[in-house]
Amino acid sequence: MDFQCKIERHPWPPYVPPQPRVLMLGTFPPKRERWAMDFFYPNRTNDMWRVMGLLLCGDRDALWDADRRSFCLTRICKLLDREGIALWDTAMAVRRLRDNASDKHLDIVEPIDLEALLAAHPGIRVVAATGEKAATVVAAQAGCTVPPIGQPVAGRVGECDFQLWRMPSTSRAYPLSLERKAQAYAVMLRAAGVSIVTNEQ
């Protein structure tokens, strides 16, 4: 099959809690057969919800349902709502140049309309891109440089000013331990005013 010919559209709308202050942006979901749930970061081997469990609940498995071998979406949404963390991705439509979820093999056909999203939710002052490709898309729209991993730069789209953070990917393919990833995310979340339960490793 020629994967370059097939355009995939993003399967979900943005997840926005009642009072968002942080927007976390990945690139695009993996193929459906890899999902453990119908939500962002759905792959059971992705570390995102373990990082969030560790930092916001003090337990890396707080959002994992061992009986179902999946993450608990109810717990995840309650946590996101409590902390004001919104989620979406930077690609609304892509071509997979290879039959996998690697960002470097994604051709972005339609990027996010970041200006519209931020204009609708002016309380968001921190945008965290969870990987290099996502950070590159945001930086291009914000007219700023791509920041180093774990550090912010000032960005602006339309009338919206924000801090753009480039975070380490939470994919297991990214060569960094869960604990080191959590340390980087803790710095960003604290800067956004989110209370961290622990980042002691």
Image (cartoon, rainbow, N blue to C red):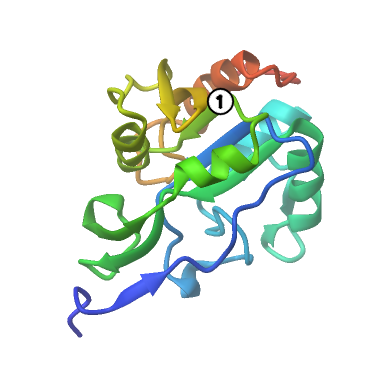
The relative height of residue 2 versus residue 110 in the rendered view (above or below) is below
The relative height of residue 61 versus residue 168 in the rendered view (above or below) is below
The residue that appears at 72% across and 19% down in the rendered structure is 196
Q: Judge from the rendering whether residue 83 lies leftward or rightward of residue 27; answer left or right.
A: right
The residue that appears at 27% across and 70% down in the rendered structure is 99
Is residue 166 in view? no
Please, what secondary structure does the residue beneath circle 1 have? strand
Q: Position of residue 178 (x, y in %)?
A: 51, 32
**Furthest residue toward front:** 159
The relative height of residue 87 versus residue 138 in the rendered view (above or below) is below
Quarter of the C terminus within the rendering: top right
Q: Judge from the rendering whether residue 169 lies leftward or rightward of residue 5; answer left or right.
A: right
Is residue 13 in view? yes
The one nearer the camera, 102 or 137, is 137
The one nearer the camera, 41 or 172, is 41
**Furthest residue toward bottom:** 1
Q: Position of residue 167 (x, y in %)?
A: 43, 29
Q: Position of residue 144 (x, y in %)?
A: 31, 23
Q: Position of residue 108 (x, y in %)?
A: 28, 58
The one nearer the camera, 13 or 172, is 13
Q: Which residue is mark 1?
A: 126
The one nearer the camera, 110 or 79, is 110
The residue that appears at 68% across and 27% down in the rendered structure is 55
The residue that appears at 53% across and 43% down in the rendered structure is 47
Callout 1 crowding tier (Cα within 10 Å): few <14, some 14–19, many ≥20: many
Quarter of the N terminus within the rendering: bottom left
Quarter-wise, where is residue 106 in the image?
A: bottom left
Amino acid at the residue labelled 1: Val
The count of marks equals 1
